[in-house]
Image (cartoon, grey):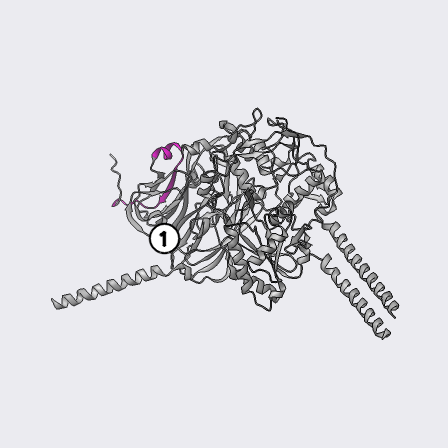
Amino acid sequence: MTNKLIMLSLIMTVILGACKNGTESGHVSGVNMIADGEPQVAEVTGAPNVPAPVGNRGPKKWIVNLETTEIEGIIADSTSYTFWTFNNTVPGSFIRVRVGDEVTLNLKNAANSVLPHNIDLHAVTGPGGGAEATTAAPGKEASFTFKAINPGLYVYHCAAPPVPMHIGNGMYGLILVEPEGGLPKVDREYYIMQGDFYTKASTAKKGLYEFDNDKAVAENPDYVLFNGKKGSLLGANMLTAKVGETVRLFVGNGGPNLTSSFHVIGEIFDNVYLEGGSKVSHNIQTTMIPAGGSAIVEFKCEVPGEFVLVDHSLSRAFNKGAIGKLKVTGDANPKVFKADHK
Amino acid sequence: MKMKHISYIIFSIIFLFTSCKENKPTVTELPSDSIFNLTSNWKNQYGDSLQLKDLQGKTLVVVMIYTTCKSACPILVSKMKTIESKINRKEINNVSLVLVSIDPETDTPEKLKEFAKTNKMEAPQWIFLTSNELDTQEFANVLSLKYKKISPIDFSHSNIISVFSSQGQLVTQEEGTIDVDKVVKTVHELAKK
Amino acid sequence: MLHTLNRYTFILIVFLLSCNNQNEMQVNNSLSNTNVTTIQHTFSNTKMVYIPGGEYKPFYGSDSVLTKVAPYLLDERAVTNSEFLAFVKANPQWQRSNVKRIFADSTYLKDWQSDTELPKNANPDAPICYVSWFAAKAYAQSVAKRLPTLDEWEFMAMADETSPNARNKPSYSDDIISLYLIKERQYNAVKQTKPNYWGVYNVFDLIWEWTDDFNSILTTNDSRTGQYEDQSLFCAGSATSSTDVLNYAAFMRFALRTSVKANYTIANLGFRCAKDTIINKK
């Protein structure tokens, strides 16, 4: 009996201690971490790719260069649309840092831009997320420096007026702030961002489509898309993985208006970093991603096949374009899934 | 006696001549981005006419205010006073603290002098300037300061304290919640140069 | 003795004066190179149209306050490449290699082949761009005009082709935005499209235009954040303080104006001139 009690108290102590350690390490404030060395230019990537994990490295200083552009691109089939972008892609380049990193963000507005642009990073603690500090007229540059103090997956976007139009035209992206020690290792990581698009034919240029303010106000988009283009994750552009691999998706929602019900048909998310924060939930079928928000989802690929990524508000998937695929190759695993052919 | 006078006078002439010569380079070799390139005409609190280039040679701490302002300007003025008090006394002779009026119509040299007296800003390092609407607008634009007359007596404006080198080049600007110590530090660093 | 002293004093005074003169001459010489206020007149035959003014609701501010715009004259079109070329020929201090950085940044008259040659293939009748506010102001002075105020410009811009105030027409803002979204419009000649109700050409379809008081739009860190919404041009602020939240075209103009500094020169930013008038045709 006493033995058991001693054992119990010992176990309790260990648990308590571990618990304490856990909270302490969680409480080491990013504010007081010292970023080492000379600033280096950070690698940034276009979707669906992400830069290399931060791993075990300490806090550092980075320079992130982004260029705002206004370009014509294909939105669906052969329809041209005037996109506004960070680094010529929708979504904009993926930025990957860790807690305690010091980031100097240089925003250059292309010389042939019509409008001023800026950047509001939700990962920034400070006025406007940097929007005012980075407002750049056509052909001009602006910059500011911030310290990443909260880990998480954050949306960034242009906040120049009219904001819904800048976002509606594709001016958003993700910045990942990894915790100390980095996120757990996985086999594959991908970058996906949903956005709603409101279009009408330009009255100034034939064959070109542009932002429709009325449809945006009515929140009635023509397209709801992953990565700014119908079919961006279909056909030759499908995401890929192998049976047995763990996949991590960094999923953001630029909006400007719709909330996404993100779902992968035929998979259950083993882990979801809810709303891109630190709380991990398990065994999730569909996760909500608010406009201007994100989620990190992880799952293990147990069986081969084409797994369909959708916004489970399904009209968006089947009528407005919010659909993509992950192709998993490898050996079948009948223990997990077996079709009974008659 | 006579000789003494002559040599004295000759000496003075030579002295004047050389001092006259020395003025030349300061007039001709201004950096392209110097505020001393502006040719607007101003009056100080003593009613003297001057141009900005007459302030050349000293570090300038510049703020735009109007004396009848009840909201932000008193804070800006007190920040300027704090900055002045924190500048090393050995360096203060090389610094001018310049308050430029946004409201030239109301802020006559007499008004400015009175304002200086009321606020105990009468030491030689304090310079108050007023001009006309056009030149005030030009100067505000050089500082990238936004302002708007919102009633006959009131202006809305951004709160900026700027530091210029002795050659009139903008060194730093503090906007909004102004970090006084940062301004003082900048002034100190310029003094070392 | 006294006599000689006087003589010497006289010499001294003469020296002093000559010294002063020399100094002044020096100053004057340097001024003639840099002085922005000494502007040589240049010829302009740009037709000006009469804008009767009136009261209008500014885009920013409180809903109930109407702003009065006095009658004025406005150039029917933007200042062109060829006109600005004539101006810099008459005013060498405004040529690219002479201009002071404080008055125009490094892209001033970008692409010009030399101080007095327009860019290759440039249409002489296209609007001048890559000019700073200071340069625009100096040009206006050279033709005995001025820049329009923001209120004057916006008052004029309420018109469409058929009415003086088209703000409430559903297509008004949309059509302007369609024009705004087209890039590199600034290379087209002026007056190739229809004028608005007042007879003003190319209000929206070629360039952004400098206004005299572009710096009067207050954003953050202002002394009266209650009255002029703090951060009024970012995020939520813009939705609460503008009087016409659906007028995205106006948002875009104001965004541009607040993003520039007076010495900025930009690929699609030019200007037209205005003038006071004592005529009141009302």
Magenta range: A314-335
**Residue A252: which quarter of the image?**
top left
Residue C150 image offset from top left, x and y in percent: 58, 38
Q: Is residue A273 left or right of residue C228?
A: left
Q: Residue furthest top?
A: C162
Q: Is residue B88 left or right of residue B16?
A: left
Please tell me which residue is depicted at 70% across the width and 32% down the height of the picture.
C46
Quadrant of image for the C terminus of chain A: top left
Please tell me which residue is depicted at 41% across the width and 55% down the height of the picture.
A53
SS at circle 1: loop
Given the image, what chain letter belongs to the residue carrying mark 1? A
Q: Nearer the viewer, residue C64 or C183?
A: C64
Q: Check the image and report above or below for B50 versus A203.
A: below
Disc 1 residue type?
A: Val
Residue B26 image offset from top left, x and y in percent: 71, 60
Is A118 inside the magenta-drawn segment?
Answer: no
Residue A119 image offset from top left, x and y in percent: 48, 47
State whether residue A104 appears in this view: no
Residue A76 image offset from top left, x and y in percent: 46, 34
Is A331 inside the magenta-drawn segment?
Answer: yes
Quadrant of image for the N terminus of chain A: bottom left
Q: Which residue is mark 1?
A: A186
Q: Nearer the viewer, residue A202 or A52?
A: A202
State whether residue B89 appears in this view: yes
**Residue C4: which quarter of the image?**
bottom right
- Graded by Cα atoms within 10 Å as few (under 14), some (14 to 19) or many (20 or more), the crowding at tag 1 reads some
Q: Residue furthest bottom?
A: B1
Please tell me which residue is depicted at 46% across the width and 60% down the height of the picture.
A60
Please tell me which residue is depicted at 57% across the width and 67% down the height of the picture.
B88
